[in-house]
Amino acid sequence: MHRWIGGGPSDRRAILSELGKDSIDQLFETIPAGVRAGDLDLPAPMDETTLLTRLEGLAAENVSLDVMPSFLGAGVYRHVEPAVVDAVLQRAEFFTSYTPYQPEISQGTLQAIFEYQTIISRLAGLDVANASLYDGATAVVEAALMAHRVLKGTRNRVVVSEAVHPMYRRVLATYTSALGIEVVTVPAGEDGRSDAQRLADAAGDEACCIVVQSPNFLGAVEDLSAVAGAAHGRGALAVHVVAEAASLGILKGGGAHGFDIVCGEAQAFGIPAGFGGPHLGFFATRTKLVRQMPGRLVGQTVDAEGQRAFCLTLATREQHIRRAKATSNICSNHGLMLLAAVVWLELLGGKGLAELARANLARAEDLKRQIRALGGGWKLAYPDTPTFNEFLVLGPANGTKLQQALLDRGVLGGVPSRLWGGSWPDGLLVAVTERTTKDDVAALIDAMEKIS
Amino acid sequence: MRRRPLRNERLIFEHNRERRARGRYELPPLDVPAVDAGSVLPEEQVREPLADLPDLGELDVVQHFHRLSQMNFAVDEGLYPLGSCTMKYNPRVNEVAARLGGFTALHPLQPASQVQGALRVMWELDQVLKTITGMDGVTLQPAAGAHGELAGMLMIRKALEARGEHREEVLIPDSAHGTNPASATFAGFEAVEIASGPDGTVDMEALDRMMTDRVAGIMLTVPNTLGVFEPRIVEIAELVHGRGGLVYMDGANLNAFLGKALPGAMGADALHINLHKTFSTPHGGGGPGAGAVAVSRGLVPHLPVPRVIRDGDAFEILWDDPASIGPMRGFYANFLILVRALTYIWGLGAEGLAETAEVAVLYANLVRHRLTSAYHLEYDAPSLHEVVFDDAFQRAHGVTNVDISKRLLDYGFHPPTMSFPLIVHGALMIEPTESPAPEEVEAFCEAMLAIAREAEESPELLHEAPHETPVRRVDEVEAARHPTLRWEPSEKS
Amino acid sequence: MSVPKDLRYTKTHEWIRREGDVAVLGITHYAQDQLGEVVYVELPDAGTRAAPGEELGTLESVKAVSELFSPVGGEVIAVNERLTDAPHLVNDDPFGEGWLVKIKISEEPELLDAAAYEKLVAEESQ
């Protein structure tokens, strides 16, 4: 009789008797004997106290970011975490409900998504955003596959800048390899930025899209107008990937520069690092392409009394209706993460988001200035390239060794730039946010000075 | 659901319309010199703050979301018998565990020495899922069931390639979830539908005929979407394996035989497990879920990377393996969902797992027994964890499954899954799960019986339902004909 | 269920009306009833070549998608532009204002007459 399971022995006997059965086993008679499970080799059930003690023990084996200065980024950033966000997420009306298929009793979830779609589409500089995807990597995949569909499958090449997050590119390769879509990777130039001409050359007349990330994996802010022009010049769609969504507080989304799809990772908006997930994939495009868009959408309508109401819409794109011809196999979204993002964004407001982004920029510029002054083999890989809150630093050893040496001095100094390979210099990607303190920076600079 | 919000909640963009400066959330003080953005960033890329998102005080935002929440139905409110979704109770201790600072404030790229506890969580969950399924390997990467299906089908593709074979088709019963054909397609296969036999299970003759050397395998839901266990599951797997194919098992309905039967023994080569269904992680209004995939020995080499590997007492991450299909997503998994699932499984233990399936099946049979006289049952094979009725009796009075579902809202219950599986016209798919007290299940049955009477006596009551919800029946046709997918400032209301 | 006598039908529930060497094409009353309220119609551009049985477009309701197959071979010479803003015409007047495309016929296979189509519908609706 477990606390999470309804009823007790006498309740169950009464039901069995109503069903005319002698035992529960009779209800499982259709399962052939050969596939039955014996006693499973699992630990005994645990009471809540014992259970939590065990989990706390595991959590305590980790070194939390709360106890060590951290400059780790590379797709996961630690921004402010207002108490209100988790308080909203803990409301059972949000977290214990399902997909809002019944709009009459799901207006809360639906309106929150509608507000999220509105804000994301504005940040992206495009007309419409979906109700979220799994994460940044899968959002990039969905963008490439959508471009492939928009061009009716006639163009089988995806051109992607090498400075798109290597992990995203790897996931793209997993998906495209099964579909016979070719991925051509174009290295960034000497300044860490993608070269629009080289992207266009790689595209030829075969590409369905050109994909760049900005700020890119190396931290560089790309020349977005040039890239959009290159893509359109070759008859391809232009895809702007954003791995650090806080940058959208100060930098226009790709839609403003002519991009057709803006997508990526919105973990920055109030979602904990959480050892890599769950995070939040976002996706925006133009109205005219909406029928090729993957993922759920919420629309505004009216109820039987003419009152404003919201519901899921344009579902005919999705797998439960179009089955093998669906625009994606996704049949969920990261609803609760989207809720975290929309609460976070609304709490900060438009001005707060801008202020946050400016604080990131200012702290990054301050740290870059201090590193420029260091000497001892430490320098910026791309000293003249515009960046937001992350940049590539070269030191007296390779990235992996630098990371370890800094860790020995009590600082998580950055992510080795060649963790996943890459044709760029081997150093550390160093990220700051508005949470980075003067003391954190002093600890990093002090540790760097001692390694030379 | 009689409760209404005190008033309709405006969109956030309609608050503080004068855009007055107000005390909003404060950032840590900026103790470095401010920077002129235009001087360090390309000037044409620098944006103005979003004008539509107003300054609001903390209580304004809290009230906004509190009021929105009041318009939602949830598991904590009442029975949520949504078939194939397994809307069970989400234990609160899961939430506490997943919010421990040692899990949330953890960057995925911290050195392995700093994240041993997190890697251990994944390794432990991996072990228990292998035990529960009787299979040989597990990936925890997929973010949802459909994502798990795709991972499984890509592994099947890779395994066939490793044998030097190229097979184009995948057989999928007509009763399957729409994700099955979609996932097969995105894995580069052609989905071929195989008709169900008269009892709703796989037609062995059709399978025998269709299972050629062009066929990579079959995608099978066990128990199937009618809640019926495939009685010839072992023969099906033997036939498919005998012809060089592989068996993908959709584990969406694992709650039906948790601790009772082993997919490994049934001949499954890949099986996805919806942690948000069977293992109680919250549905979150649509996600995030997690769709772990268990595989047979032949597919183990092809599991996605990165993987957690154990070296003595230490755990490491393996990023590269040429035999792998590659990564399915960023980083490792929806880790904080995994923490919840492991907490749940450890809380239940082996006995609790078996008890889960027992009570889930008992309740589904109770519902079936109580409603059989009032609702039509197209397929009468024995039910496990769910039962699929339809609206055939009520259609005579001009009442559809939609009307029945909307009326249920007035009685304070979430409706069943509607119009699925496709092989049942006007389907009402009911899955009570094991969580509620019997009184709650009985009250639901009473409501369904009352609605069946209303359908005969006053069908207009059902056509116009719901009556008691925060909004009345929502016009989904209007939404699709004139898509309004975001708020526009001109819409001053 | 209305089935006008002067039209020809397909097993996939399209109808055509001959106007000289042009076929006006639509879906039947039965088809629109099965589909439910049409919310979106996707039609080919004028100039598209179609073979008999080839997919020409799709019609969508809120919860279903139905493909439109060309009953004849030929060239699409006109599409019903009004459906972009008024897809409900397919429901309101399937044999009239809810027509979908006009095709200049180059190949016309055997089609069902009204009696044969009525029989088909009677069988399907059982």
Image: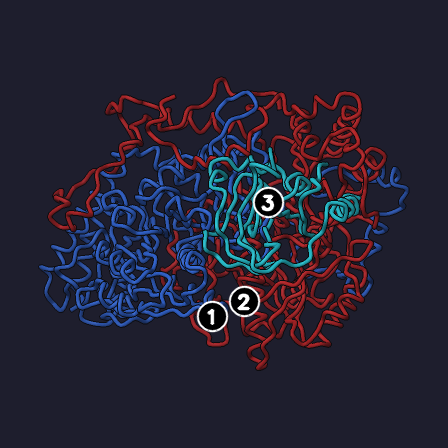
- The answer to whether residue B150 is left or right of residue A265 is right
Q: Is residue C69 above or below residue C5?
A: below
**Disc 1/disc 2 C-alpha distance (Å):** 8 Å
Q: Which residue is mark 3?
A: C26
Q: What is chain B's hue in the picture? A: red
Quadrant where the C terminus of chain B lies?
Answer: top left
Query: What amino acid type is highlighted by mark number 2?
Result: Gly
Question: In the rendered image, which quarter is residue B9 located in?
Answer: top left
Q: Which residue is mark 2?
A: B188
- Badge 2 density bin: few <14, some 14–19, many ≥20, Cα 10 Å: many
Tell me the cyan chain: C
Q: Is residue B313 above or below residue B13?
A: below
Q: Which residue is mark 1?
A: A180
Residue B270 pos. (x, y %): 63, 65
Q: Secondary structure at mark 1?
A: loop
What residue appears at the point 25 percent right and 49 percent down from the top-left corner? A257
**Disc 1/disc 3 C-alpha distance (Å):** 37 Å
In the image, farthest residue toward the top: B6
- The chain identifier of the residue carrying mark 1 reads A
Tell me the blue chain: A
